[in-house]
Image: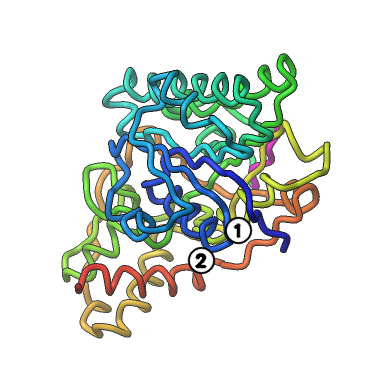
Amino acid sequence: MTLLTHTNVLVTGGAGFIGSNLTERLLEQGNQVTCLDNFATGKRENIAPFLSNSNFRLIEGDIRHLDTCRQACLGQSVVLHQAALGSVPRSINDPITSNDVNVGGFVNMLVAARDNGVRRMVYAASSSTYGDSKQLPKVEDNIGRPLSPYAVTKYVNELYADVFARTYGMQLVGLRYFNVFGRRQDPDGAYAAVIPKFVKSLIAMQSPTINGDGSFSRDFTYIDNVIQANQLAAITDNPQAVNTVYNVAFGEQTSLNELIAILKQLLSRYNPAIANVAIHYGPERQGDVPHSLASIQKAQSLLGYAPQFNIQNGLSQAIDWYWHYFNQ
């Protein structure tokens, strides 16, 4: 695969789960990387190893401030925009802040990228945009009505990107992430994603709680697949491949019950007693979609996307990281 090398790259949300993994890979490939983060959800420990790298620069700031966005975009060739307030439940509890960050901050980044002549901006979109669409697999051109304020904000990002591309001649690519997991994903807090939350409970020999009966399914996507998609979107010279959106997933469905079974199996290698931890079932979560499965055909054909990690392979790597993280 052709890689992004020797380029000035801004990663917004660069101290977060996805952003820090992108930053790490880009530094390994010899890029000059600027990280913009306000540490609302990002962690200083995620970027601590990069601070001594002369190719790394940290700007501590908020995308809700246009001047900060302009400063961060100065001299950049590529922007990988990951900064956002994630989580459906968070957006239901506080729609105003989710909108301010995810929509207002996104428009600030578009304006700053435009005004600084950034060559291309790749932004984190979301599978939540499919809303109440029952079609499986999910195909980019067929979406439903959003089911949460978070989903609204991510769809509005796509609309703004389309308008800015047509109005100002910008090169913008949206990546609709499907349930990304992997190293550095935060296991703590009220809005922790399901995989690190389950792993933390199991390692502690505590019963994880599944929302619903465990039949809900997701297209879980390992972080390295996401890194690949971002690089391909940043470097493609195919005119048809820009100013559009792509599903970023593996293209396989896994139910929550199946997920728990895989986690138990993998964690039992470290502690056999984990295989016997009981599972609790709770009420379904408001705003949750029952099933999610991506078609990745568009990304395969236009970007050359070829995800290397299925759920089993990805979890094997992630579990190794989490086991050492929780047993330091």
Specify the farthest residue to the front. 54
Give the quarter of the figure containing the C terminus. Answer: bottom left
* Residue under label 2: 311
Percent of width and height locating residue 193: 34, 50
Location of residue 165 with respect to 76 vertically, above or below? above
CA distance for labels 2 and 1: 8 Å
Percent of width and height locating residue 176: 58, 41
* Residue under label 1: 250
Question: 244 and 204: which one is in front?
Answer: 244
Give the quarter of the figure containing the N terminus. Answer: bottom right
Instruction: Count up the numbered dots.
Output: 2
Q: Is residue 238 magenta?
A: no
Q: Residue 234 carries which label?
A: none
Chain part drawn in magenta: 137-141
Residue shown at the point (59%, 28%) measured from the top left: 144
Residue shown at the point (52%, 19%) measured from the top left: 107
- Residue type for callout 2: Ile
Q: Does the magenta stretch include residue 139?
A: yes
Left or right, 119 with reference to 83 = right
**Is label 1 in a helix, a strand or a loop?**
loop
Percent of width and height locating residue 202: 23, 68
**Discs 2, 1 touching: Cβ within 8 Å:** yes
Location of residue 279 with respect to 227 vertically, above or below? below
User: Can I make out residue 149 in this image?
Assistant: no
**Is label 2 in a helix, a strand or a loop?**
helix
Question: 296 and 162: which one is in front?
Answer: 162
Question: 244 and 64: which one is in front?
Answer: 64
Q: In which quarter of the image is residue 66?
A: top left
Location of residue 92 with respect to 122 vertically, above or below? above
Label whose residue precedes the other's in the sequence (2 or 1): 1
